[in-house]
Image (cartoon, grey):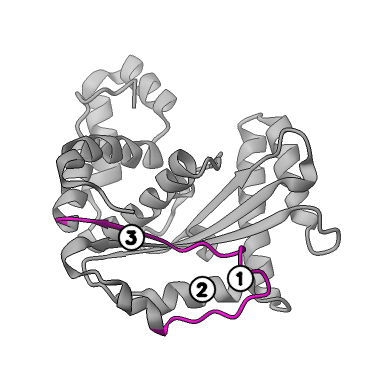
Amino acid sequence: MEVDPGSKDQYVEYISKAVREAYVDSSYLSTVMEREGFDGVAKLFRERFDNKDFGVRTGDFGEIVGHTILMDVLGYSIPIYKIRYKTNWSKAAFGIDIIAFRLDENDPHKDTVVFGEAKASTQKDYGIEKVFDEIKQLVEEGQPEAQQKMRNAVRFVSERLFELKQYDLENRIYRFLDSYTKPHYIEAFYPFLVREKSTWSDDILQKVVIEKPNPNQITLCVFVIDDLEKIINIAYEKAAKPESNVTGS
């Protein structure tokens, strides 16, 4: 996937809103606005955005791009943004970057859970083998640590939904927890590579091989854009401006 140079400005506006939404619930922003005005919102944004070095921002940006692709392009749902719950900014909660779902309206047995791993960098080969290795560990059968990692991620989503009193959705998500004793849904895995266009070439992928039982189980997404480092910084700057559409983000 590639951002067309002519639509880069529109993409920056779009992704800056996605950045903000990934960190802060929009309804909570409205509440802060009512209670404390712009000063309170500005303080909240400083707490969420100003204390991150570029490496952390890049890592989070990769996850956020993964969010937008899964939801806006592929039609998955992400009921809980894990980035909002990070207690260690340098690590993803439970070691899995993204967890998403597609719930079938007619047949719950066709429900899908997605586990995504993202690596963003201006270097074309940074983290390529690592992200595929992480996906491989999740895909391969007979790995109890990987299975527990996936269960922990689903459990996390279930608990947050219960706390939010979204009981019907929580009950549907909870069904994914008994997958290894009563298989009744689909697992899908998405490695995301977010890269600087000027340094990227597809040849780096030739040395990556994953042996998997189901060829449709893994979908690689490569997202390239010019001036990636600049785009990341601008997106965070725009996301951190309280006067920029606070209630509509």
Quarter of image, res 159:
top right
Query: Which residue is the site of mark 2?
Result: 134
The kind of residue on which mark 3 rests is Gly
Say how many tags the image has: 3
Mark 2 and mark 1 in contact (Cβ < 8 Å)?
yes
Comparing 67 with 43, the one in front is 67
Q: Position of residue 107 (x, y in %)?
A: 79, 39
Q: Is residue 124 left or right of residue 173?
A: left
Residue displayed at 34% across by 27% down? 249
Q: For the residue labelled by badge 2, is the local secondary structure a helix, a strand or a loop?
A: helix
**Residue 163: mark:** none
Give the mark nearer the N terminus: 2 vs 3. 3
Residue displayed at 26% across by 39% down? 16
Q: Position of residue 21 (x, y in %)?
A: 38, 36
Q: Is residue 109 above or below residue 248?
A: below
**Residue 59: mark:** 3
Q: Is residue 50 above or below residue 44?
A: below
The alpha-carbon separation of the residues under discs 3 and 1 comes to 20 Å
Q: Residue furthest top?
A: 34
Q: Is residue 130 left or right of residue 18?
A: right
Q: Per the image, is 38 magenta?
A: no
Q: Main secondary structure of the magenta part?
A: loop
Q: Which residues are magenta?
A: 207-227
The alpha-carbon separation of the residues under discs 2 and 3 comes to 15 Å
The alpha-carbon separation of the residues under discs 1 and 2 comes to 7 Å
